């Protein structure tokens, strides 16, 4: 109305909004929260989660089950080892049955996770476990066959058994046991086939295991190195088991069962290292009749050489470095005819030339070095040799070496042959010290060792077998047989000192002491190989050989070592550089290998490092195989092999095939 004030106009108040009304917020005001309905979890996600939970529970129980079965199997294997150490054949048989039962349960538990072999990464470990379990089954089968084979002869090899009555009681000597074993060889041969087949099956299973995919350590425990070591040991044992039958078949010939055998036994002094194991210091003729060993005669190699007229040209290294008799004549002496690193090749030359000085009608040559004597004395203890005193492995201060080595070196310490007067027959103009005792000691010493060894009671037999086997395995005993068929047998058993044919990477380091007294008694060797594989598969290698002589000069045993080194590598390898040699020689080829050679001197309390860099003549893909052959007569040099940031370290006690990734 006209004249009314705004304040006089009635105001309409809005009603309170209902709770379910929708409010439109004003511009610039804060929006009020809106309550949303909860969403339902998709069914597929619930199902997947349930499956994962069930799978996790399944895997937990599966792995717990496998762990329990593995733990039980480990316990039974430990018990089996204890029975074997106790030389209890019935206990071994009983425990082997328990191991077999535990292994069956373990293999059964693995079926629960067998499907995991398709899972990346983890599947490899599952597959390896199954390979190992399958190999275990084959080995148990092989062991059962072996136990059946040896049961009648258990007492012979030092085991307490139920079937050993025919072999005699515990008072039987080693010779009597050996006589019985020799008669039983024909019955053992068929068993060798069964054992070989089963061990071969186990080896094929284990070849599927790749140690390099395992961690180096698990906590404080070595994993990868232990696995590699175990597989290497098995490969070595498997080789002898698989290739043992030919040697067993040839044993009647070797042991003189069908006809007496005459062997020339060469004593190689490994303290004065030469290519096949040592300087040939003395020899003996050994007669073997129906397993009985009898030394016929022994003599000094210098006396044999004094009646020999040299006809073969000497190597340049002898003329240049060894000098001595080679200053006047460039023809090779008998005592130096083991110049070839291949023992068979050296002995072919030696046997042919020795025949001209009366070494005839021999069936073979057996070379032994001082380490065999050390291993045997470890078992036998001190022995007495009539007229020469006692010999033992006790370390003495005079040389910081076994007493037996000191005594033998004393007898062997002569320079040059005996010189007889031209005008007065029978008169000696010059005779080195001990020349008359030196040639006499070999026969009595051999007789004493053989008498002691073959007279031992049964509790010493396993240790004697181990000493003999170790000497063969480490190349302290080598065989060369005149009969070509029998020679092939000892070669197949790898006790012939041959340079092997091999298609992959190869290495053999061969050293020769050319006038350094007996310094190899103290010299050690370390070998490092760095392998670089390019993307195209081409390979470059750096080989470093470190020689150390920590002992002081004494003018008798230890002196400056003039060392002639030869390195055998794959044929066609290209030498790019070499360091540390005082004199280098052009590469050449021998035995289907390329050879890098050189000369250097190592002084007492000194170190010498020699390096060869070279390229391989082929390319590699995938796995990398390297065969390393040990020089006979050497100890156990430390080897380090590195490839693609991985490194393997080991002591080379025998030939070794490395499978690198």
Image: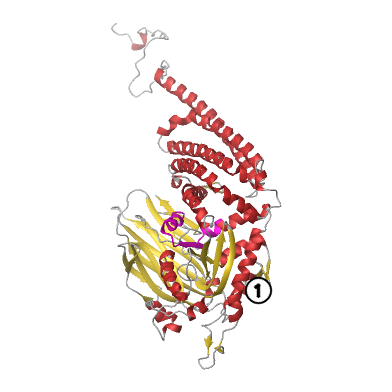
Residue 414 placement (x, y as % from top left): 55, 81
Quadrant assignment, res 23: top left
Left or right: 297 as drawn, with respect to 543? right
Looking at the image, residue 314 lies above or below residue 5 = below
Query: Magenta residues?
Result: 469-493
Count of numbered labels shown in the rendering: 1
Residue at 42% in and 23% down? 48
Residue at 41% in and 75% down? 599
Left or right: 290 as drawn, with respect to 587? right
Q: SS for tag 1?
A: loop
Badge 1 crowding class, 10 Å Cα cut-off, few under 14, some 14 to 19, many 20 or more, is few
Q: As drawn, which residue projects farthest toward the bottom?
A: 423
Q: Nearer the viewer, residue 42 or 204?
A: 204
Residue 444 placement (x, y as % from top left): 63, 70
Residue 336 placement (x, y as % from top left): 45, 75
Residue 422 placement (x, y as % from top left): 50, 91
Q: Which residue is mark 1?
A: 397
Residue at 55% in and 77% down? 558
């Amino acid at each position: 109305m006209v004249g009314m004030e705004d304040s006089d106009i009635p105001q309409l108040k809005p009603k309170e909004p209902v709770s379910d009304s929708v409010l439109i917020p004003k511009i610039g005001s804060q929006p009020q929260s809106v309550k949303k309905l909860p969403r339902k979890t998709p069914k597929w996600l619930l199902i997947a989660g349930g499956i994962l939970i069930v799978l996790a529970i399944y895997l937990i129980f599966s792995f717990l089950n496998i762990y329990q079965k593995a733990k039980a199997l480990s316990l039974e294997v430990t018990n089996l080892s204890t029975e074997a150490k106790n030389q209890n054949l019935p206990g071994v048989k009983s425990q082997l049955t328990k191991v077999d039962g535990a292994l069956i349960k373990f293999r059964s538990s693995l079926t629960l996770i067998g499907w995991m072999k398709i899972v990346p990464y983890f599947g490899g470990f599952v597959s390896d476990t199954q390979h190992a379990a399958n190999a275990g089954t084959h080995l148990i089968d092989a062991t059962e066959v072996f136990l059946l084979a040896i049961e009648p002869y258990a007492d012979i090899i030092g085991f307490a058994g139920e079937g050993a009555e025919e072999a005699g009681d515990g008072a039987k000597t080693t010779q009597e046991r050996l006589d019985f074993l020799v008669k039983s060889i024909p019955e053992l041969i068929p068993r060798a086939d069964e054992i070989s087949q089963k061990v071969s099956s186990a080896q094929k299973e284990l070849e599927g295991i790749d140690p390099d995919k395992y961690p180096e350590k698990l906590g404080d425990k070595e994993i990868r190195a232990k696995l590699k070591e175990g597989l290497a040991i098995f490969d070595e044992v498997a080789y002898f088991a698989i290739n043992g039958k030919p040697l067993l078949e040839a044993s009647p010939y070797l042991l003189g069962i069908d006809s007496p055998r005459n062997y020339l036994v060469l004593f190689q002094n490994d303290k004065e290292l030469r290519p096949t194991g040592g300087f040939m210091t003395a020899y003996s003729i050994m007669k073997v009749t129906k397993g009985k060993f009898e030394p016929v005669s022994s003599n000094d190699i210098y006396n044999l050489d004094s009646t020999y007229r040299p006809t073969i040209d000497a190597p340049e290294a002898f003329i240049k470095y060894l000098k001595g008799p080679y200053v006047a004549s460039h023809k090779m002496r008998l005592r130096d005819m083991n110049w070839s690193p291949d023992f068979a090749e050296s002995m072919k030359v030696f046997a042919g030339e020795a025949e001209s000085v009366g070494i005839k009608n021999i069936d073979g040559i057996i070379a032994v070095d001082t380490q065999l004597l050390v291993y045997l004395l470890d078992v036998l203890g001190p022995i007495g040799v009539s007229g020469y005193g006692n010999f033992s492995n006790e370390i003495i201060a005079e040389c910081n070496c076994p007493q037996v080595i000191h005594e033998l070196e004393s007898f062997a310490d002569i320079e040059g042959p005996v010189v007889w007067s031209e005008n007065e027959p029978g008169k000696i103009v010059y005779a080195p010290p001990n020349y008359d005792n030196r040639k006499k000691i070999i026969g009595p010493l051999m007789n004493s060792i053989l008498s002691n060894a073959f007279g031992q009671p049964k509790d010493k037999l396993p240790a004697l077998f181990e000493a003999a086997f170790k000497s063969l395995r480490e190349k302290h005993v080598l065989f060369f047989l005149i009969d070509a068929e029998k020679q092939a047998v000892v070669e197949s058993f790898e006790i012939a000192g041959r340079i092997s044919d091999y298609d992959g990477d190869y290495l053999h380091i061969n050293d020769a002491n050319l006038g350094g007294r007996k310094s190899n008694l103290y010299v050690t060797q370390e070998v490092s190989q760095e392998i670089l594989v390019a993307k195209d598969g081409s390979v470059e290698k750096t080989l470093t050989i470190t020689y150390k002589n920590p002992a002081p000069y004494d003018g008798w045993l230890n002196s400056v070592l003039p060392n002639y080194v030869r390195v055998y590598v794959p044929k066609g390898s290209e030498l790019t550089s070499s360091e540390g040699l005082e004199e280098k020689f052009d590469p050449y080829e021998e035995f289907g290998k390329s050879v890098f050679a050189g000369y250097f001197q190592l002084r007492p309390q000194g170190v010498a490092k020699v390096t060869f860099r070279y390229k391989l003549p082929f390319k590699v893909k995938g796995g990398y195989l390297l065969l390393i052959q040990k020089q006979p007569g050497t100890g156990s040099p430390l080897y380090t092999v590195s490839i693609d940031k991985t490194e393997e370290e080991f002591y080379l006690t025998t030939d070794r095939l490395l499978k690198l990734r």
